[in-house]
Every structure is written in C-alpha cells, then in structure tokens.
C-alpha cells in the first residue's frame, strides 16, 4: 500500500468517525418527529375534552329542565313569546341557555312530554287521595308532547305508546310524570374538517330524564284562549 493511499484511507476513516459522532442536525430531526406527535396528542385531548363537555352540557340541560318543569302546575301553550315563565317558549329559551356554549338551536333539540294515568287523570282532573292510596298499578299514557319549531327533523321522541315509562319505573293508579329529552349532534374534529375529508361524522348525544310533578297531579298544557287541557300544542 502506498503512503498516498494510506493517507486517503486514514482521512476517510476520520471523516466517517467525525460524521458518526457529530450531533449537528439532531435537534432538527427530533423537532420534525416529536412536534407532529405532540400536536396529534394535543388534538386528541382537545377532542376528548370537547366531547365530554358536550355530554355534560346535554345531561345538565336535561336534568335542570326536568327539575324546573316538574315544579310547574301547568305549561302554557305559547311557543313564540317567552313572556311567561311557564310557557313553552320560555322552556325552549331556557334549554338554549343551559346548553351554551353548545349551539342547541342549530344542532340539537328538546322534547317535553307529560305522562298521565289512562284510568284516572288523562282528562287533567285532580286525583283524590283515595285513588293514590290504593297502590294499584296504573297505565301510563302520553297526555301531550311538545318540541320547538327550530328542532331538526329526525330528532324524534323515544317515548312510544308501548314504552311510555321505563320498565323499572313504579307507576301506580293516579300517578303522573314529566319526561325531558335533549338531543345534540356533536361533530368531532371540527377544527381539522377542512383538511381531513375522512374525519369521523357527527354523533348524536341523547339524554332522557323522568321526574314526578311536585304538585302530585298531572301536568296540563293550557291554552289561555282555548282548552285548559290540550293534548296537542297549537304552535
């Protein structure tokens, strides 16, 4: 081996050794790899928080509305003017405020259902104490049901004639109840939707709450200029 070749090989070996020991560019490589992963984790936690908040707000809206409506002695059939706290319009306005900052009026809905005992109080008459003391089983039926005009189509009540109250709900002669149903269409990854066409579609959050009226009597839907016991909202 000539001295020239040996020198070249030695120089090449030193260059390779320096390259392997060099840390130049390491920070850049770490930045390129770590930062996107951190952003994905941050996005995941953000979406998890937003979803949990949406679920919590739907539950809060349903329980608070049920507690408020359960204290009413009647509901006024007026879905446009919230001038009376007992009107349907006031209930719809309250539901929007309770669900804030989620936009319930744009992406959700609410249904209020009054439930009566088919054998005793579906005519809105007062039930005497003797009927209540019998503890005989009652037959739950829907007296009236109402929803706001801004509610999207497809958000229908889960309460049917065959399934008015849950199977484990004790419903006896002369009993009554109020059911509140709240819907909300939650769209995950809405912030990245313009850049991610395959993002998961909207999912519907639903909560249903039953309460008994504080008065112990059925909750009627009254029309000031019409029937004191309506079965279908006029508006």
Image (cartoon, grey):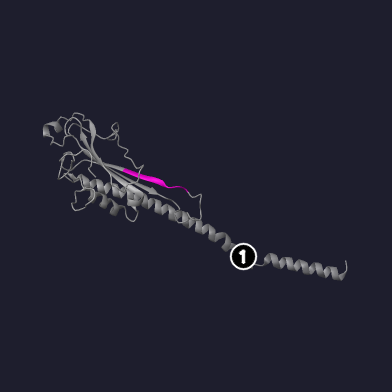
Q: Secondary structure at mark 1?
A: helix
Residue 174: % across, % down: 17, 33
Q: Is residue 10 left or right of residue 34?
A: right
Q: Which residue is mark 1?
A: 26
Q: Is residue 201 magenta?
A: yes
Q: Residue furthest right?
A: 2
Position of 186 with respect to 63 (left or right) is right
- Residue 123 location, quadrant: top left
The quarter holding residue 220 reads top left
In the displayed structure image, the side of residue 8 where residue 133 appears, left or right: left
Q: Is residue 6 magenta?
A: no
Q: Position of residue 24 (x, y in %)?
A: 64, 68
As drawn, is 182 to the left or to the right of 195?
left
Secondary structure mainly formed by the magenta segment: strand
Percent of width and height locating residue 122:
18, 34
Q: Magenta part of the protein: which range?
A: 200-207
Front-lying residue, 34 or 166: 166
Report the residue at 42% width, 52% height from top. Answer: 48
| Above or below, comparing residue 37 to residue 201 in the picture | below
Determine crowd level at label 1: few under 14, some 14-19, many 20+ residues with C-alpha closer than 10 A.
few
Name the quarter where the C terminus is drawn.
top left
Q: Pinpoint residue 101: horizontal percent, then vertical percent.
A: 34, 56
Considering the image in quadrants, where does the N terminus appear? Answer: bottom right
Q: Is residue 32 above or below residue 71?
A: below
Of residues 124 and 167, the one drawn nearer to the viewer in this rendering: 124
């Amino acid at each position: 081996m000539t001295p020239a070749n040996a020198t070249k090989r030695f120089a090449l070996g030193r260059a390779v050794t320096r390259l392997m020991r060099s840390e130049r560019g390491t920070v850049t490589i770490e930045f390129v790899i770590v930062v996107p992963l951190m952003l994905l984790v941050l996005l995941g936690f953000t979406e998890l928080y937003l979803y949990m908040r949406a679920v919590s707000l739907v539950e809060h809206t349903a329980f608070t509305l049920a507690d408020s409506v359960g204290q009413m002695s009647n509901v006024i059939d007026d879905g446009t003017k919230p001038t009376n706290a007992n009107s349907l319009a006031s209930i719809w306005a309250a539901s929007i405020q309770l669900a804030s900052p989620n936009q319930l009026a744009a992406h959700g809905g609410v249904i209020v259902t009054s439930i009566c005992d088919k054998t005793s109080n579906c005519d809105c008459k007062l039930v005497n104490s003797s009927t209540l003391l019998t503890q005989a089983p009652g037959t739950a039926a829907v007296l009236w049901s109402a929803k706001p005009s801004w509610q999207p189509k497809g958000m229908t009540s889960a309460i049917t004639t065959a399934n008015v109250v849950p199977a484990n709900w004790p419903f006896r002669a002369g009993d009554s109840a109020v059911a509140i149903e709240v819907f909300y269409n939650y769209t995950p990854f809405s912030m990245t939707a313009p850049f991610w066409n395959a993002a998961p579609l909207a999912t519907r959050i639903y909560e249903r709450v039953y309460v008994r009226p504080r008065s112990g009597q059925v909750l009627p839907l009254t029309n000031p200029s019409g029937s004191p016991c309506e079965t279908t909202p006029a508006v």
